[in-house]
Image (tube, rainbow, N blue to C red):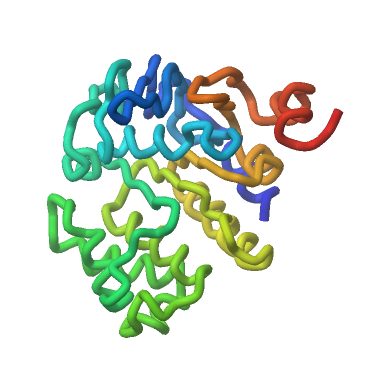
Amino acid sequence: MTDELRKAGTSVMTAPLLRIEHLEVRYGDLIGVSDVSLDVPEGSVVALLGSNGGGKTTVLNAIAGLIPVHSGGIEFRGQPIGGRSAFSIVREGLALSPEGWRLFVQQSVENNLKLGATPLHDKKRAATLLERVYDIFPKLSERRNQRAGTMSGGERQMLAVGRALMSDPKLLMLDEPSLGLAPAVVETMYDTFGRLHREGLTILLAEQSVELALEVSDFATVLQVGKSVLSGKASDLANNPQVQKAYLGMG
């Protein structure tokens, strides 16, 4: 699993597909993140690491346009997207598979997937994308008429990723994709992420499992209390004493 995903990222372009500079997000008087900067090179897997409450989900939601940006810059494909609507950001080629899935639980699997194609410029492509998702996740094809709310956690995670893929993104953001899943399901999911990456998809991964995230990523940024404090090659951070002590229980 992890070797395939790691090898898939050996050819990485230098120009960032996504760039965040000094991002600050506030919830009223509360500061969600205060100073986050990171680059996501095209063709790479980048991990966003940090403890619970460190700001990972806030950063992803701000990139996706789900919450407003107080200050700082977000550029996707060289164009500023901070302050734009979530719908328009998805149309630019950036999709989020959120923590907790946020599915329409009373709707069927297929209806959830079709809703993911809503931002497409060319609606005729939806059928082709749907078949691609079913090829990637055969279990979703088997359950296409089943209500999303009756599925297992692993199946809901597949559905959330599949829905994001229905917008045909250039960059896929994954928020805690292993959370609450059995190890065998996590391995299957990461096999799928490896396949998507080999097919050319850039991935920004916020992950609770720091060891797993560092193993499969090309680069990583570490957040502490809403600030980016370390960035670099994932292999270097995996050997960094500060990261080992704070997140890997070593030292």
Q: Nearer the viewer, residue 185 or 23?
A: 23
Q: Residue lying furthest front in this view?
A: 29
Callout count:
0
Q: Indicate the quadrant containing the N terminus: top left, top right, bottom left or bottom right.
A: bottom right
Quarter of image, res 18: top left
Image coords of residue 153 (percent x, y): 51, 69
Q: Is residue 77 visible?
A: no
Side (left or right) of 126 relative to 103: left
Q: Indicate the quadrant containing the C terminus: top left, top right, bottom left or bottom right.
A: top right
Q: Residue lying furthest right in this view?
A: 251
Q: Residue at x 37, y 66 (%)?
A: 133
Side (left or right) of 250 relative to 206: right
Q: Nearer the viewer, residue 14 or 249?
A: 249
Image coords of residue 220 (percent x, y): 58, 29
Quarter of image, res 170: top left
Q: Residue at x 60, y 19 (%)?
A: 230
Q: Nearer the viewer, residue 62 or 195?
A: 62
Image coords of residue 81 (percent x, y): 23, 28
Side (left or right) of 203 relative to 7: left
Q: Is residue 240 above or below residue 103?
A: above
Q: Is residue 150 above or below residue 174?
A: below
Image coords of residue 23 (percent x, y): 37, 20
Q: Is residue 12 visible?
A: yes
Q: Residue at x 44, y 52 (%)?
A: 99
